[in-house]
Structure formats: C-alpha cells, structure tokens
Amino acid sequence: MGKKEKKASEATEEKKVVTRYDRKMEERRKAAEKAKREEKYFRIGSIIVAVLVVVFLAYSLIRPVVEKYAATHNVYITVGDYELTQQEFDFYTYTVYNEWLESYGTYASLFGLDTSTDISRQEYTDDMTWKDYFELEAAEMLVQYVALTDEAQESGFEYETDIDYASFLESVTEAAEEYDMTVAAYYKEAYGQYATAEVVEEQVRFYSYALGYYNEIYSGIEVTDAEIVEEYQADPSAYDYVDYRVFTLAAEYEEDADEDTISAAMEEAMAQAEEFVERLNDGEDFNELCLEYCTEDETSGYEDDGSLAEGLRYSEVSSLYADWLFDDSRKSGDVEVFEDEDSHYYAVAMFVSRYYDTEVNDEIYDNLFEEKLSVYLEELTADYSYTFS
C-alpha cells in the first residue's frame, strides 16, 4: 500500500460516524450534568436562605432588646447641662400629647391624626411625624423647666415635691383602675413603651420643683395702678368704648349688571344718603329715617331703635368708620357718610359718645402681667437650647 492510500485509510478510521443513538446518549449526558449543577446551586441557595432566615429571626428577637437598651441608656436630648434618654424624654413628649388630646381629641381626625395608631408612624408634614411634632413641643417646655430649675437652685429655693407626686400617683392609680390595668401598664400606655414607675417619679418630681419655683415667680409679679394708667394713656382707642348709630344704603342692581349700571346705582344710593343726612340735620330722628329709607327686608333690623350700637371697642367696629368714631376730635351728633366701593353701599354714621369703663382695668392688668411674665421667661431661657442626639 502506498503512503497516500495508508493516510486515507487512517483518516477514515479517525472520522467515526455519529449515529442517532450517539446523539441521544450525548444529550442525556449533558442533561444529567445540568441537573447535577442545578441541584448543587439549589443546595447552596437553600443554605443561604436558611442562614438569612436565622439571621432575620435573630435580628427580630434582638432588635427590641437593642432598641430598649438604646432608649434607656443613650442620650436622646440635651438641654443645658441636662441629658435625658428617650425613656425619660418620652414622659414629656406624651405629656404634651395627652394634653393635646384633652383639648382637641374629639377633632383629632380633622387634624389628620388617628389616635388609635402609633403617632411615630403618622405624618404631620412631609418631613415630620406627629411624634416629631410633639417632641419639639416637649423640648420647648423642657427648656423652661431646666432654666427654672437652674435659677431656683442657684437662688437656694426649696420646695417639697412629695405632695405633688402623691397627688400625681393618686390620679394615675385612679386612671389605671378605670381602664382595668395595672399602674405599670398604664405608665407605658400614657408615657411611652419604655416608661417605668421609677423614671416617671423622677420626672414628676423634677418638673414639680420647676413649677414650684415658677409659681413663686408668678406670685411675685406686680402691676401698679400707675402702670395701668400709663398703659391706657399710651393708646386710649384700644380700651375705650363708643356708642353710635349707623344706617346702610346698598346700591340696588341685578346680579349680572355691568359696571355702568352699578355706578349709576351707587350714585342713586349716594343721593339717598345725602338726603338722609340733610333731613337728619333738619332735626328728624335717626332711627325713624332708617325705617323710612330701609328696604322691607331690613325693617326688622331697625325696629326697637335698631340703628343704635352701644359699648363697642375699636376692634369690634367696622373698619369703614372705626378711625372716624375714635378720633379725639369727635363730638356727639357728628355725622359722616362712608362709601364701601367693594361691597357697593354707603353707611351713614352718627357719633353718640366715647367713654372709658373701669372694668377695662382688669384687662389692662392681665395684659401687663402676661407681658412681664413673658419677658421674664424669654430672658430666663435666652441662653438655653435643646439638641437631639
């Protein structure tokens, strides 16, 4: 055999024919290998999932413990030299919340608050929850308590808090009985999930001492008669009363009237007002003229001397003629016509009298007292602020 024939024979032997059976067996082999790989991946995935489940369960069990530890040990807010944990600060937050409920609880839903749901999970604004809101209010309140306490201690102020705490505890015990729960459970319901009797007592005694000093300052504020007179003389119009008569003449026109029609109606109303004043100056009675010039629907309003307004303060009088009535140059019997361009009517006003009632002294006293108290608290807390950790 020649070399060429030998090579051709070897090539034929190397080129083995692949039968249908061979292809089928190859496919089974590849499928078996694929299944083996998938089984391996599945076992690995199952192990990972099992580990994650264990981790999640462990985290679920550990998380409350971690959160409680943080709430009872870590500094949550600092006011002056005072550092409070969340457990301690929650007392003030929920005190503010409970007071808010007493005032607005019936209308809470109108404010967007669901009182049956955790306030920390409800939006007050886009970037603030309801709990955030009450915390800020509580922080402002705490600033005053801390500032009062510091000044009280510096001045050597002594105050026994036992009576206040006993009264607080009595009210809490009654409330717990009313809701059929223990005092400990009531504390958590009323002052947060981390509240304890020990922490609540500590905070009650703290703010009782501060309020004790506050009451001492409050009772020491004085307002003298001279200060009341000075306040009145500074702005008599704010405290005086006036008696006056008034009659209104509205322009009459259809609802869809144009500007020209309205303008003509106003001119007619003005002419009537001027005629009213002219007859008044001739000696006719103001209220009788009102009954004559008013519409049928308005008659009942002017019966029984209905044009007379008595004992009104500046803030209670229409701004259309309030300045005129309270002008120092006003004399009894003065009359003026006033135009309301927006509402399309004229008002005829007659000044009767302006006077000062000594009962206003009580109001002035209260205003000055609150002003002095406000100034005191502003100065007291000027150097205090709060910082959340």
Image (cartoon, helix red, strand yellow):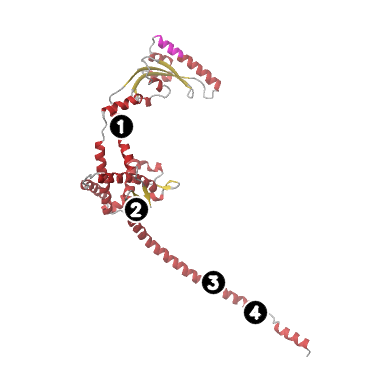
First reached walking from the N terminus: tag 3 or tag 4: 4
First reached walking from the N terminus: tag 2 or tag 1: 2
| Residue 327, image x, y percentages | 38, 20
Q: Of tags 4 and 2, which is closer to the observer?
A: 2
First reached walking from the N terminus: tag 4 or tag 1: 4
Disc 1 target residue: 368
Determine the image quadrant of residue 100: top left
Asked which secondary structure carries label 3, the reply is helix
Q: Of tags 4 and 1, which is closer to the observer?
A: 1
Label 3 and label 4: CA atoms lie apart by: 24 Å
Position of residue 36 relative to residue 362, above or below, is below
Residue at (39% x, 48% y) in the render: 132
Disc 2 target residue: 86
| Residue 280, image x, y percentages | 40, 12
Give, as a three-letter code, the residue at label 2: Gln
Disc 4 target residue: 22
